[in-house]
Image (cartoon, helix red, strand yellow):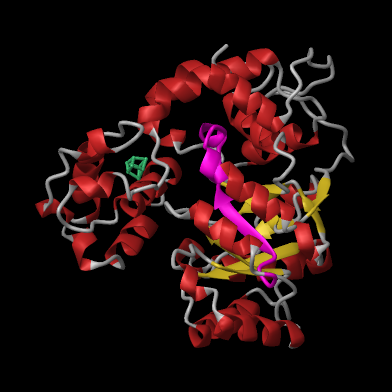
């Protein structure tokens, strides 16, 4: 066992005892009336399911049966976004809950990437209309990067929107290189109630991130993890031999590892099939912890694929190029294409990036692999980005 293993295990206070015989695996079921358990979402005071439905995908415009199955299993936290699936997701949810008559059962989260207060309010208003509801249970700044956005003007807007009953709680999502700084800021900002951030098994040893998560948890900020699979879906050849860990399949194992972190309330998961909804719900319902075989397999997998997964920390690799290309963002958009097949969305988002990033064809990325702490082959991926986004 390596030092890294011990640190991670100590940090997460994971027991290494034998796994109970009732532990669920990939193919097992659950009692007919079983529901995903709930946990308090920080200072919101609301108990939400520990598994949330990631909504960045196309749904049936009238009634999507995957949502019905999710609700049946207790996955009543829907994480929507203004731009998701070409702006169709809020309408799909509105239609779903109207037909299912279950709006009150849902914890409906909304968000917009447009953070100027007037624009945010417009997107919120549109979102409420499309989602056929008078309020979002949580509204977030989507993909916050600039900490200055959390200013007095935003605080005033949030206060007013709450008074008007349009939002119940407020927060932000983030996934770029400054996630730790933003978590620290959230800890000092009383009106930020929830942070949804990129967090996966590869990051357990990251001291800076852990200190920031600690600060946010201490300030009772509700913490929601996303992108818990660690981008490995982009690299199917690499992960195939680790598909099964000990008792869990790899997809379940990486989520169990995040749930083992008591600071995290819920995981937003992209579940585009019935099978994924069922398998993830089964993992969430099981009381079984990760056993030593699971941790060892996950650890081996993390090490073997470390150079294939990007954390978005592009202040490192950008130091090796002479134009400020947003490498981390370009890598994330590639992941939308690779992992989710959302090529049109990735292209549209890429088109909205700054001129330096869109000019990536003329940049020499050959020094980036050495500048990346994980040895990611940036030049290879930027060539892929060029072929995909600029053709
Ligand atoms: S390529 Fe490496 S340094 Fe650059 S953002 Fe990704 S993980 Fe960070």
Count of marks overlaid on the render? 0
Q: Is residue 55 visible?
A: no
**Which quarter holds ligand 1?**
top left
Rendered-image quadrant of the C terminus: bottom left
Q: Position of residue 258 (x, y in %)?
A: 65, 37
Residue at horizontal 56 percent and vertical 85 percent from the top? 153
Which corner quadrant of the image does residue 126 belong to? Answer: bottom right
Q: Is residue 193 magenta?
A: yes
Query: On the picture, is 286 further left or further right than 323?
Result: right
Q: Position of residue 71 (x, y in %)?
A: 77, 52
> Does the rendering let one see residue 301?
yes
State left or right for residue 132 relative to residue 38: left
Q: Which residues are magenta?
A: 190-209
Decide if residue 141 is on the left or right side of residue 357: right
Residue in front for this viewpoint, 248 or 155: 155
Query: Where residue 79 sits in the image (x, y, percent)?
Result: 63, 59
Q: Is residue 225 above or below residue 142?
A: above
**Location of residue 145 with respect to 330 vertically, above or below:** below
Residue at 71% over, 45% down: 263
**Where residue 233 sits in the image (x, y, percent)?**
45, 35
- Vertical comparison of 11 with 215: above or below: above
């Amino acid at each position: 066992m390596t030092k890294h293993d011990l640190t991670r295990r100590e940090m997460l206070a994971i027991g290494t005892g034998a796994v109970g015989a009732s532990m669920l695996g990939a193919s097992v079921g659950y009692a007919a009336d079983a529901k995903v358990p709930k946990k308090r979402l920080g200072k919101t005071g609301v108990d939400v399911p520990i598994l949330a439905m990631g909504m960045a995908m196309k749904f049936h415009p009238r009634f999507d049966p995957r949502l019905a199955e999710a609700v049946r299993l207790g996955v009543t936290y829907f994480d929507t976004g203004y731009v998701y699936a070409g702006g169709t997701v809020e309408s799909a949810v509105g239609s779903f809950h109207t037909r299912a008559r279950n709006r009150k059962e849902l914890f409906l989260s909304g968000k917009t990437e447009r953070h100027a207060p007037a624009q945010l309010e417009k997107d919120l208003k549109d979102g409420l209309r499309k989602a056929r509801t008078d309020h979002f249970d949580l509204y977030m700044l989507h993909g916050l990067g600039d900490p200055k956005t959390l200013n007095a003007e935003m605080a005033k807007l949030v206060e007013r929107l709450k008074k008007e009953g349009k939002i119940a709680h407020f927060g932000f999502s983030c996934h770029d290189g400054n996630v730790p700084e933003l978590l620290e800021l959230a800890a000092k900002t009383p009106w930020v109630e929830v942070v949804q951030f990129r967090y996966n098994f590869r990051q357990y040893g990251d001291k800076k991130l852990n200190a920031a998560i600690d600060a946010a948890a201490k300030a009772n900020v509700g913490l929601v993890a996303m992108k818990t699979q660690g981008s490995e879906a982009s690299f199917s050849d690499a992960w195939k031999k680790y598909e099964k860990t000990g008792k869990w399949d790899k997809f379940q194992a990486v989520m169990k590892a995040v749930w083992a972190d008591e600071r995290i309330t819920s995981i937003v998961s992209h579940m585009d099939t019935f099978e994924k909804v069922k398998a993830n719900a089964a993992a969430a319902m099981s009381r079984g912890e990760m056993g030593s075989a699971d941790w060892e397999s996950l650890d081996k997998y993390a090490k073997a694929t470390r150079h294939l997964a990007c954390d978005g920390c592009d202040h490192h690799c950008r130091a090796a190029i002479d134009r400020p290309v947003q490498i981390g963002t370009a890598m994330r958009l590639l992941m939308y294409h690779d992992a989710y097949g959302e090529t049109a969305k990735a292209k549209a988002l890429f088109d909205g990036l700054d001129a330096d990033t869109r000019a990536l064809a003329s940049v020499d990325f050959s020094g980036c692999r050495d500048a990346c702490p994980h040895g990611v082959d940036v030049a290879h991926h930027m060539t892929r980005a060029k072929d995909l986004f600029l053709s």
